[in-house]
């Protein structure tokens, strides 16, 4: 298990990975997975969570902002109207590990190629 994935000190069957305002949670004993979004601004706190099935998440790539050469991993579910874009490829890999998903080969290849292009490699 990656050292970025944390274990709940009160229940070792609950593991999580947090990045920004998003927490990815795995309940190993239930074979259940959840994504929690939280935000707090000007005395307003918003929290939304969705249980997801890893095999229902679509892996793809997308551009980030106005730079059309940088490709980043995306996990999405049309059924849940859910899209999570990762600015960090490592975060995508952490979620794949936590949710027991094999990283998508095309996503890995595309993001690796994008990184090589940034370095001026051919």
Image: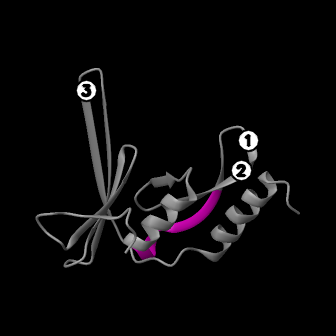
Q: Is residue 113 left or right of residue 89?
A: right
Closer to the chain start, of discs 3 and 1, is: 3
Residue placed farthest to the right in the image?
122
On screen, 56 above or below 62? below
How has the structure been colored for display? one colour
Instruction: Kindly identify which residue carries mark 1.
Output: 67
How busy is the neighbourhood of tag 1: few (under 14 within 10 Å), some, or many (20 plus)? few
Image coords of residue 18 (percent x, y)? 35, 53
How busy is the neighbourhood of tag 3: few (under 14 within 10 Å), some, or many (20 plus)? few
Q: Is residue 43 left or right of residue 81?
A: left
Separation of disc 2 and disc 3 at Cα? 34 Å
Closer to the chain start, of discs 2 and 3, is: 3
Nearest the viewer among 38 and 77 is 38
Residue 6: mark in rendering: none
Residue placed farthest to the front in the image?
3
The stretch drawn in magenta includes residue 82: no
Separation of disc 3 and disc 1 at Cα? 32 Å
Image coords of residue 22 (percent x, y)? 37, 49
Instruction: Kindly identify which residue carries mark 2.
Output: 70
Name the residue located 29 percent from the left edge and 47 percent from the top edge: 48
On screen, 36 above or below 75? above
What SS does tag 3 mark? strand
Name the residue located 50 percent from the left edge and 67 percent from the top edge: 93
Magenta residues (range): 54-61
Image coords of residue 33 (percent x, y)? 30, 68
Nearest the viewer among 80 and 120 is 120
Instruction: Kindly identify which residue carries mark 3.
Output: 44
Q: Closer to the observer: label 3 or label 1?
A: 1
Image coords of residue 119 (percent x, y)? 79, 54
Q: Closer to the observer: label 2 or label 3?
A: 2
């Amino acid at each position: 298990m990656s050292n970025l994935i944390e274990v709940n000190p009160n229940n070792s069957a609950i593991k999580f990975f947090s990045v920004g305002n998003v927490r990815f949670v795995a309940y190993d004993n239930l074979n259940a997975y959840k994504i929690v979004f939280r935000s707090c601004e000007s005395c307003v706190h918003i929290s939304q969570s969705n249980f997801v099935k890893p095999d229902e998440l679509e892996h793809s790539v997308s551009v980030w902002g106005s730079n059309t050469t940088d490709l980043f991993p995306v996990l999405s579910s049309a059924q849940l109207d859910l899209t999570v874009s990762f600015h960090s490829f490592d975060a995508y890999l952490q979620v794949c590990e936590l949710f027991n998903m094999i990283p998508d080969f095309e996503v890995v290849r595309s993001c690796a190629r994008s990184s090589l292009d940034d370095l001026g490699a051919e």
